[in-house]
Image (cartoon, rainbow, N blue to C red):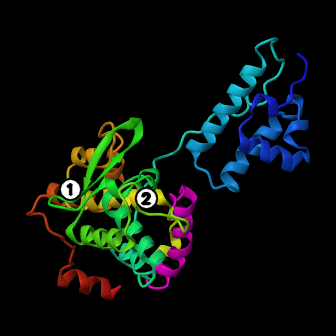
Amino acid sequence: MAERSVARLIAPPPLLHYVQRELGRTPAALDLADIDADLVGGFLDHLEAERNNGIATRNARLVAIHSLFGYAALPRARPTHPARPGHPQKRPDSTDVRFLTRAETDALLAVPDQSTPLGRRDHLLLLVAMQTGLRVSEITSLTCADVELGTGAHLRCTGKGRKHRVTPLTRPTARLLQHWITDRRAGPSDPLFPNRTGGRLSRDAVADLLTKYVPAASATCPTLAAKNVTPHTLRHTAAMALLHAGVDTSTIALWLGHASTKATDVYLHADLATKEKALARKAPPEVGTRRYRPSDSLLAFLESL
């Protein structure tokens, strides 16, 4: 098969950036023969070690590489495939659910300076994220028209699969949102949480907020320093708060927009408090802690040795 430019085949951008860095060639100058199994393996390691991507992202990139070379091999069978068979997909040991405790959420919410417009925006964004459990893409796409602040205050959003759902708001949060919208004189189509120019915030912008605020919150709540807090951590925090409040997983699944309770069951596995309560209900109430206590004659015998 005649060599083809990798760029013309529209290779995944992260792969192109990595190959350019390693080989010192622009994507337009690359040929398929330049990408071998060792280079793909280094790219997969780079995703986890340098970009801090999870196993799911790593596997998704590997699928994209398979598709790229599968398409390239259509005219004539390619003798070697750099992504096969030496780079199988990884399987995670377990689902890692990171969430914040009540003390950690309080510390994080106290950091933004609410005397400034940006500080008020950031405080409200974090508060809404940790109360509603909306995905970061759902939060950044909210407009002022998506907020209902009357009786039964709630947010309307469109989640995965274009599914519409409604998430309730607490009265204090609804009041803060009312003041926020009124003070900005925002119109119905304006973003609820705008950037500096009035447009929509990006996913990276929300991640940058956490990068800025979490270290500051760690000063008053040291446990935050050991946690990798991402926008999705705020979603997990909302789910765990509901679980600790006694809300069943079926309701939590509807709240978060999960297709079934299977995705919500991970919170049961991650919640040690729920397991301890279950253990307490299971243990016979009459069983107490008993210790062996030797008799006086035994102690006298032991002391005589």
Lateral position of residue 9 relative to residue 177, left or right: right
Give the percent coordinates (x, y) of residue 48.
66, 51
Q: Main secondary structure of the magenta part?
A: helix
Tell me the crowding category of disc 1: few under 14, some 14 to 19, or many 20 or more residues within 10 angstroms, Cα based.
Answer: few
In the rendered image, which quarter is residue 171 located in?
A: bottom left
Lateral position of residue 183 relative to residue 291, left or right: right
Tell me the crowding category of disc 2: few under 14, some 14 to 19, or many 20 or more residues within 10 angstroms, Cα based.
Answer: many
Query: Mark 1 falls on what kind of element?
Result: helix
Give the percent coordinates (x, y) of residue 161.
40, 35
**Where residue 278 is drawn, which disc sits there?**
1
Please name the residue shown 35% across and 74% down the image.
183
Q: Evaluate if marks 2 and 1 touch, with contact meaning CB atoms under 8 Å apart.
A: no
Camera-side residue of 15 and 265: 15
Residue 192 can be seen, yes or no:
yes
Give the percent coordinates (x, y) of residue 274.
25, 58
Where does the C terminus fall, quadrant-wise?
A: bottom left
Q: Which residue is under mark 2?
A: 191
Residue farthest top in this picture: 76
Please name the residue shown 78% across and 42% down the image.
16
Q: Which residues are magenta?
A: 199-222
Nearer-N-terminus badge (2/1)? 2
